[in-house]
Image: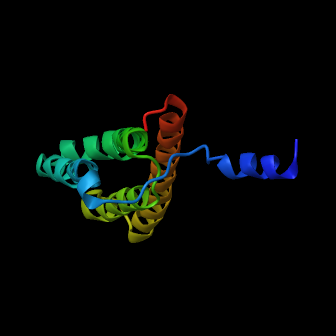
Amino acid sequence: MSKKNRRKTIKKKESAIAKNDFSVDDSKIYIIATLIMFHIAPLIMVMLGENGQLLLLQTFLMMLNPIFISLAGLIYGIKKGFNLKLPAFMGFLALISIPMYYKFDTLAYTIQTTVIMGIVYLIFAFGATVIGAFLRKLLRFE
């Protein structure tokens, strides 16, 4: 095999993750679903009073929000490919909802929970988008 042919094969290799450019038009449904999950649903739970607040803390913060952000990132990755802007945007929307709707005893605990859960949400969104983009490439959805 000559050097010329070897160089051609190296140039033809593609990354294992499908990438795309971020478009607000393509991402509208994911942004709206994130707004509903992180802002509208907690607002309804807060209006339900003490029981709603307790349900919000136990169910939404620790279970439903990470599951939602993972599924939304996975679906986005499969349909559109990987882009760093959508997971960052989803993580930012989740981050600003925590001090707004979740009631904690002290300010320090609120800040601590916001930082920790913000990092968790970013990791889940980023990881799910990467896995979805890899599945897109693997299953040839392009």
Q: Tell me: residue 108, above or below residue 127.
A: below
Quadrant where the N terminus lies? top right
What percent of the width, then of the height, locates residue 102? Answer: 29, 56
Where residue 73 sits, quadrant-wise, is top left
Is 8 left or right of 121, judged from the image as shown? right
Total number of numbered labels?
Answer: 0
Residue 39 position in % (x across, y down): 22, 55
Name the outermost residue toward the top.
139
Image side of residue 93 versus residue 53, left or right = right
Q: Position of residue 85 (x, y in %)?
A: 41, 62
State how the image is colored.
rainbow
Q: Quadrant of the C terminus?
A: top left
Apparent side of residue 105 relative to residue 41 in the rendered image (left or right): right
Q: Is residue 118 above or below residue 9?
A: below
Is 97 situated above or below 18?
Answer: below
Q: Nearer the viewer, residue 10 or 81?
A: 10
- 140 or 29: which is nearer to us? 140
Give the percent coordinates (x, y) of residue 2: 87, 47
Residue for point 28% across, 49% down: 30
Nearer to me, 59 or 50:
59
Relative to 13, is 22 above or below? below
**Residue drawn at 19 percent across, 47 percent down:** 41
- Look at 34% across and 39% down and name the residue there: 64
